[in-house]
Amino acid sequence: MTIIGENYIRFDWAMKRLLRNKANHAVLEGFLSSLIGKKFKIQRFLESESNQEDETDKYNRVDILAENENGELCIIEVQNNRELTYFHRMLYGVSKAITEYIGLGSPYDKVRKVYSINIVYFELGQGKDYVYHGKTEFRGAHEPHDILKLSVRQNKKFFGIDERSLMSRKEAGDLFPEYYILRVNDFDKVATTPLDEWIEFLKTGQISDKATAEGLAEARECLRVDSLSDHDKRAYVRHMESIRHMKSIFDTSHYEGYEEGIEEGRAEGRAEGRAEGRAEGRAEGRAQGRAEGIAEGRAEGRAEGRAQGIAEGRAEGELEKSLEIARNLLSLGIPVSQVLKATGLTQEQINKI
């Protein structure tokens, strides 16, 4: 199989610079249709507080807010580096979009349906899959198989469908936001579905010549690096270098600090365990018999020493990791307030760097 690849623009940069152009809407529409499972025709792109570019975050996160022809909203966000509170930010982003796009005093039926699409390039949560879908579902507390549906009147008002059959009516949860999480780095299989073909492109930047997913044919044409102007090409190269540099800083600091902390903890635990084991063994041996005391003292001492040593070592390792991350971020010109939030260090600790 021939791979046409390594010459396509990364998706987050394309979202920011190219895909807002109406001529390129087919790329995003194809991606959304493959993911959501229904046609999503973009009517326009909207502006919100969440998708205004932040100088300190522009290489880590890119998001856009689109409206389709039915008035539904779709937040598409690409996040490059790990964030502990990412799930909470997903919730906040959806809530913000809902409140921003309903007029003050408007009736509740003007609340928009929101899709939150989150493309992440880091380990988010724990799970075996690489695509997750979350939606609200109202199940009976006493009848778990009973899912709450809309009434005939609600079904017609909110979805324009005059459906008398209960089984065919929309669920109450269909009015609520839906969330999609694409853990791109966890994709490690051969693409066999349109969505897989999109995930493969998001991970590798490559598009198979046999890919048939909606939107990828258009992506082949408008996302080629060699189609960029010299100015945009230089900007794109700077963007990619900044992403690599930032990722290297975070990954190196995190993993080296963690591993060093474990090794130091083990070494200190062994030393303290031996010393405490000998001391306790001698004391107990005098009272209960030399042989029994030495055996029990050493066993208890080693266990306690290892536990204490590992705990102390981990704490020291975590602190050193945080200090190293802080040094790197400060060297990049990141504001102290942002460094404090990112590392959890105190102002006093930052001042000593």
Image (spheres, rainbow, N blue to C red):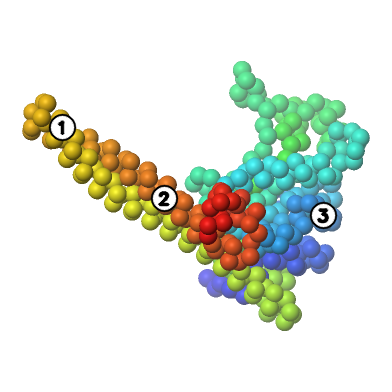
Q: Which residue is mark 3?
A: 47
Which dot, 1 or 2, sits closer to the camera? 1
Q: Which of 5 and 193 lies nearest the eye of the viewer?
A: 5
Name the residue furthest right.
Answer: 105
Q: Which of 195 and 53 lies nearest the eye of the viewer?
A: 53
Identified at 63% across, 57% down, the residue is 336
Up the image or down, 333 lies above or below 38; here it is below
Identified at 67% across, 32% down, the residue is 137
Q: Amino acid at mark 2?
A: Glu
Q: Which residue is mark 2?
A: 316
Q: Going from the N terminus, do you reach mark 1 or mark 3 first?
A: 3
Q: Amino acid at mark 3?
A: Glu
Element class at badge 1: helix
Q: As drawn, is 289 to the left or to the right of 71?
A: left
* Disc 1 crowd, CA 10 A, few/some/many (<14, 14-19, 20+): some
Up the image or down, 206 lies above or below 226; here it is above
Residue 60 horizontal/vertical position (percent): 63, 60
Could you tell me how far apart the alpha carbons at marks 3 and 2 are, in whole angstroms?
44 Å
Up the image or down, 215 lies above or below 136; here it is below
Residue 189 shows in this picture? no
